[in-house]
């Protein structure tokens, strides 16, 4: 079976188990829109049936004869229903529905519709200032009315497909008109999906399962298939077998390792899933350049505000949990799969739920009593967490001028206790991005970055990192305003807390043995302080020696 056929299984499963309203929630870029387009092409009257030739579903003769090309279909993608104000977003909704209704212009002349029904259709096509126009009352009833007109014309109930149903709510929350958008969508969905005798069935997709009480009130025959559901577990995204076949088709089998490391790790139901957006983009890059490196395609396709918000809101406990995730461990959390957008920021626990449903975290093992073991799925998403942690810490440093100035003054004056005290405080506040299996040199780079961020806050200093000098590279070299003064820092990662003092001595000896002071002396700076700085987890030790 091919990577195409797994998507086609969705049609068969849906016809065997459909509810009147079916909601699929998956992270973005996992093939939701592709699945919806497939459903439209399969069910819509007048479809090109040859699209499915030689594919899995075409082998289901009885099913195809009964359902293929037999229904009128309304298909809306709400991904562009956006605006800085409610009025702009409502207008975007009107344009979307107006364009969809325009596909059925034959209704205007149909003898199967009454004069009243023809006038109803005309209400979809009113143009003012070059745009579709509807009053609020008609907008709320528009999908129900359109499904009614199509049912009258074809003598067959209508399918309604709504892709990215939650995007208008997300945008509304961001821009401050969330209650108004909830009211509008509740009204439209209520009439189209709840009390609509002209509806055969509806399929909706989105990232979040918005609380039923918010916009789906009163829907009795309502089925939700979330990321933890074993039903349709392989309907979105690629399985390992599909990725292997895709790579083989392009003769790229030798790249499977990096594809797995970067883009695997999602778990839907009991299935191990790769992000299809990433895999397809990487294969495309490799097709043009067989030395192309993996990139963060999924991450770069939209912002990462959710991770940023979690990090900014994190208390000490949450920062420790983020560190566990970064090092590849799992954290156990009770997950709420139905939230409203205005609940997301109310409690830090709700943030975990949203990160899970949107794909920044995935489950490992099985859910137990509403509790999930959450992990970062792959290298791509881990890089997002690391990037957001670094940006957050840079802001922490920028906002704590008193501490950074005390550290800088300490380096200038040889006050090791001040430096040590303030650095330890910074370390206790930050979120470690260290891999516990990383080499000590890699761990030193992490602390190197923290120190550079602090030192560069002093605009009057020339701070150079890994500058070639003497017989090697000094980790950090500082040229203060005073032309006679120079500072050299050498960093070490200690083997244990008891090794901090010895690590500092090793750092000082390295500065002297390799002549790291040469460049400073050539610059006329003979008043030189050499610092050996050792780190172990969130502890540090600082020693100084005048050269």
Image (cartoon, rainbow, N blue to C red):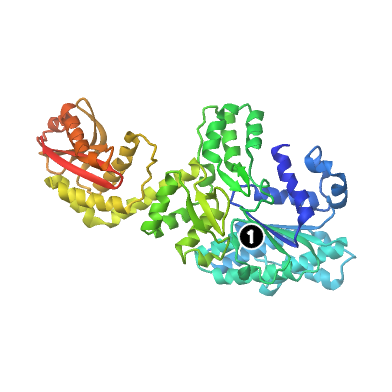
Q: What x and y, as percent, mark residue 111?
A: 90, 65
385 versus 503 height, above or below: below
Q: As drawn, is 12 to the left or to the right of 162? A: right
Residue of label 1: 165
Q: From where the camera sits, is residue 409 visible? A: no
The C terminus: image quadrant: top left
- Which residue is pictured at 22% across the width and 52% down the height? 422
Q: As drawn, is 231 to the left or to the right of 61? A: left
Q: What x and y, as percent, mark residue 311?
A: 41, 55
Q: Quadrant of residue 309?
A: bottom left
Mark 1 Cα-neighbour bin, 10 Å: few <14, some 14–19, many ≥20: many
Q: What x and y, as percent, mark residue 184?
A: 63, 70
Q: From where the camera sits, is residue 157 visible? A: yes
Q: Secondary structure at mark 1?
A: loop
Q: Spot the residue most to the top.
A: 471
Q: Spot the residue most to the right.
A: 111
């Amino acid at each position: 079976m091919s990577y195409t056929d797994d998507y086609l299984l969705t049609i068969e499963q849906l016809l065997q188990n459909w509810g009147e309203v079916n909601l699929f929630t998956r992270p973005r870029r996992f093939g939701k829109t592709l699945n919806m387009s497939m459903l439209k092409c399969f069910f819509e009257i007048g479809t090109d049936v040859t699209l499915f030739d030689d594919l899995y579903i075409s082998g289901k003769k009885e099913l195809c004869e009964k359902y293929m090309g037999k229904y009128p279909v309304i298909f809306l993608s709400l991904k562009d229903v956006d605006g800085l104000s409610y009025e702009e977003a409502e207008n975007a909704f009107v344009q979307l529905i107006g364009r969809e209704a325009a596909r059925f212009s034959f209704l205007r002349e149909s003898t199967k519709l009454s004069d009243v029904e023809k006038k109803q259709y005309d209400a979809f096509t009113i143009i003012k200032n070059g745009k579709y126009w509807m009053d609020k009352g008609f907008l709320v009833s528009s999908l129900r009315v359109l499904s009614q007109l199509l049912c009258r014309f074809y003598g067959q109930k209508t399918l309604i497909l709504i892709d990215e149903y939650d995007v208008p709510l997300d945008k509304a929350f961001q821009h401050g008109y969330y209650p108004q958008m909830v009211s509008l969508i509740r009204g439209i969905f209520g009439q189209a999906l709840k009390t609509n005798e002209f509806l055969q069935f509806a399929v909706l997709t989105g990232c979040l399962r918005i609380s039923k009480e918010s916009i789906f009130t009163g829907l009795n025959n309502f089925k939700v298939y979330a990321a933890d559901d074993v039903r349709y577990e392989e309907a979105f995204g690629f399985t390992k077998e599909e990725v292997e076949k895709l790579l083989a088709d392009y003769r790229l089998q030798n790249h499977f390792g990096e594809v797995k490391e970067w883009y695997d790790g999602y778990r839907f139901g009991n299935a191990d899933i790769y992000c299809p957006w990433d895999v397809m983009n990487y294969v495309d890059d490799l097709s043009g350049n067989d030395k192309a490196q993996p990139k963060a395609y999924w991450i770069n396709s939209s912002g990462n505000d959710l991770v940023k918000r979690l990090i900014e809101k994190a208390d000490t406990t949450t920062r420790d949990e983020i560190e566990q995730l970064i090092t590849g461990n799992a954290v156990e959390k009770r997950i709420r799969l139905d939230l409203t957008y205005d609940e997301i920021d109310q409690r830090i626990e709700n943030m975990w739920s949203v990160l899970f449903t949107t794909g920044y975290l995935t489950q490992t093992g099985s859910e137990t009593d509403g509790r999930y073991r959450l992990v970062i799925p792959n290298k791509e998403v881990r890089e997002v967490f690391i990037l957001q942690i670094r940006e957050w810490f840079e802001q922490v440093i920028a906002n704590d001028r008193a501490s950074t100035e005390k550290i800088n003054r300490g380096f200038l004056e040889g006050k090791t206790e001040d430096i040590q005290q303030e650095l330890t405080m910074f370390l206790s506040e930050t979120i470690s991005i260290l891999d516990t299996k990383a080499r000590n040199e890699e761990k030193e780079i992490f602390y190197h970055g923290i120190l550079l961020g602090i030192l560069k806050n002093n605009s009057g200093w020339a701070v150079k990192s890994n500058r070639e000098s003497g017989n090697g590279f000094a980790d950090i070299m500082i040229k203060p305003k005073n032309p006679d003064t120079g500072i050299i820092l050498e960093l070490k990662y200690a083997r244990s807390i008891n090794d901090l003092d010895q690590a500092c001595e090793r750092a000082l000896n390295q500065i002297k043995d390799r002549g790291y002071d040469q460049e400073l002396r050539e610059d006329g700076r003979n008043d030189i302080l050499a610092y050996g700085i050792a780190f172990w987890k969130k502890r540090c030790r600082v020693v100084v020696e005048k050269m």
